[in-house]
Each structure stands twice: as C-alpha cells, then as structure tokens.
Amino acid sequence: FFLSLYGHKLPALAVDASDDDTILASGGADKTIKIWGLDFGDTHRTLHGHSDSITDIRFVRRTHNFFSSSKDGTVRYWDGDRFDQILLLNGHTAEVNCLGMSHTGGFVLSGGMDRQIRVWERTKDIVFLQEERERELEQIFDKVDGGKGGESTSALLRRRDDDGEEDNDGEEQPHSEAAVKRSLLSVSSGDRIMEAIETADQEIKDIATFNRSQEDKLEKDRKQRMPNPLLLGFEPPQYILWILRSVKSAELEQSLMVLPFGHMERLIHYLIILLRSGRGVEICSKVAVFLIKTHQSQVSFVWYFRPCCLSKPKKVQCG
C-alpha cells in the first residue's frame, strides 16, 4: 500500500496508469476524470466532458494520452500532459462499457450495451483541437435547439439551402455554396490560411535579410541558414499549398471569403508561383478563379493586379 487518492465526489469506476508510472487517470460516477501524479499523489487536473458516469480508461502505450468511455455513449481521446480533449468519437447508440487498447496504439476497441464492438483506427489525418471544440459546441447547440421543439441550426441552414428561398423582390437567390452563412469551422479555416500567408511572408523577408548579411563575407565564412520549423520543411509557396489542401473541400470557398483584401493579394501571388511551377494545379486554379470572381471589382481597379491577372491564363484556362 503506497498512496490513498481522494478527490471524486462519487465512487471511482475506472483507473489506469501510464507506462512510465508517472501519472494515473481515474474516472468516476461524478462524470469527471482526474489526473493524478504518482510521486506525491496530488491532483494535476480534473477533466470535464462526459455527461454520464465514466466506465473505462485506457492509456496509449508509451504516451500520456488515453481513451475514456462513458454511459453517455461516447469515447473520448485525451492528452494527459496538456489536459485537452483531442477527439470525440461518436458511434455507439447506448452505454459504452469497456475499452481495449492495441499493443501498438494503432487502434482501440470499444464495447457497449448496444451489442456492438467498434474498432477505432488511427489515421494520418491532422487534428486541429480548436476545430474539434467548435464542432462539439455546434452539436451541443443543435441538441439544445432540438430539445426546445424547433429545428437545429444546421438543419435550418440545410433546409434553407435546399428550398432556395427567394427575396421579396422576386429576384433569384444565388445557389453557390459560398452564399451560405459562414460557419464557425470556415472562419477557423480562414484564420489558418491567413496565419500561413503571414508566416510565409515573414519567412521570405528573413531569407532576404540573411542573404544580404552573407553577401560581404568570404565563401568559406558564409553560413547556411537553418530551415524554419514552422514551415514543416516546405518552401513558402509549398507551405501555402499544404495549408490549402488541409482545408476540407466543402469549407474551402467559405474560408476564402473570410480573407481580407491584403491577404487575398498575397495568396494570389503564391498561387501564381505554384501554377508556374506546375504544383497543385487543380486546387490552385480553383482557388484563384474563385478569388478573382469574388473580388472582381476590386481587382479590376487595382493597377498592380493587372500583370497577375494577365499572366494567370498561361496556366489556367477559364471557361
């Protein structure tokens, strides 16, 4: 007997420790998960997320990340170091009773009162925590709206898009997906594109400054510049392409509508570089055509855009 850990208001129902025996996670009937330090038995953090009793907890091997299951029918993936929820896994239609973790951490099994055993496999998709939180909030709001007897927010948007409502003037409404009200996810994706443009611009300035500082030095005294880790080993245009590809195609147009005119100008500059090099032609063409159609009046009146617009058709044929 080494430690007594007190903290749950109701009985503790599940417990598991990390491989290195530094932290322990416990879940109870009070709907909370507590992270304990095994050195002194102190509580590092109390995690809230499940809406019913916790039934099982399993750590991923050689990490401080763990899965939890609950009677609310969900499985959740947590970061035990940063105390953040990484993923919410929906699929069971009843209570989830137990979890089983693979030896390699490549997948997790969950079993529930719905007589199902589900296999959750790890993929190479990038998870953005802010987007996951916003998606969960939207689901909570939809449940609240549905509980009041009205349609959920997402259902209203879908119905309005399908019905194609007309104005009082009798004018036809645009049917483009870009006309749909901007969602929280599209705004978040737009912010990522803006941050990528600013990071790429700063990298180009830093490279120019470094090259100027090396011009007066002898060949043997010149240093090689270390790559910027924020760009993940890409050149600035390729980094912009990588960010554009990470945005879901259904949200791409709405995300581009969030961009200010100055960022749109820089994005077109990078798109032209990518098109001239033959990289990402399909997505770059789609983005460039959408931006020019959306900002046609501004582009036609700004003199420094005219060379860009004249050079683009060499790579893109617009029908």
Image: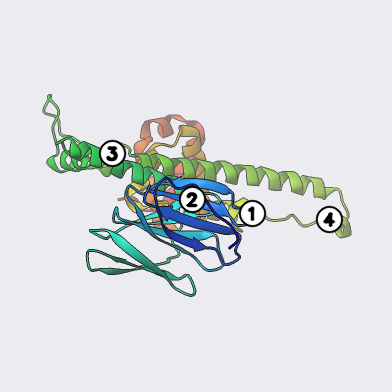
Secondary structure state at the residue bearing disc 3: helix
Q: Earlier in the sequence, mark 4 or mark 3?
A: 3
Of the two numbered discs 2 and 1 in the rendering, the one whose residue sits closer to the viewer: 2
Q: Amino acid type of disc 4?
A: Arg
The residue drawn where x is 52% and y is 35% is 304
Q: Amino acid type of disc 1?
A: Pro
**Total numbered circles:** 4
Residue 308 image point, x, y percent: 48, 43
When the figure is inspected, residue 193 is found, relative to residue 277, above or below; the finding is above
Measured Cα–Cα span from mark 1 to mark 4: 21 Å
Residue 236 image point, x, y percent: 58, 51
Secondary structure state at the residue bearing disc 2: strand
Q: Residues within 10 Å of mark 1 (few under 14, many from 20)?
A: few
Of 111 and 42, nearer the camera is 42
The residue drawn where x is 34% and y is 41% is 137
The answer to whether the residue labelled 1 contacts the one labelled 3, judged by CB atoms less than 8 Å apart, is no
Of 112 and 164, nearer the camera is 112
Question: Which residue does the numbered mark 1 point to in the structure image?
Answer: 229
The residue drawn where x is 28% and y is 38% is 141
104 horizontally vs 161: left or right: right
Q: Which mark is residue 141?
A: 3
When the figure is inspected, residue 153 is found, relative to residue 11, above or below; the finding is above
Of the two numbered discs 1 and 3 in the rendering, the one whose residue sits closer to the viewer: 3
Of the two numbered discs 3 and 2 in the rendering, the one whose residue sits closer to the viewer: 2
Q: Is residue 10 visible?
A: yes
The answer to whether the residue labelled 4 contacts the one labelled 3, judged by CB atoms less than 8 Å apart, is no
Q: Amino acid type of disc 3?
A: Phe
Of 34 and 237, nearer the camera is 34
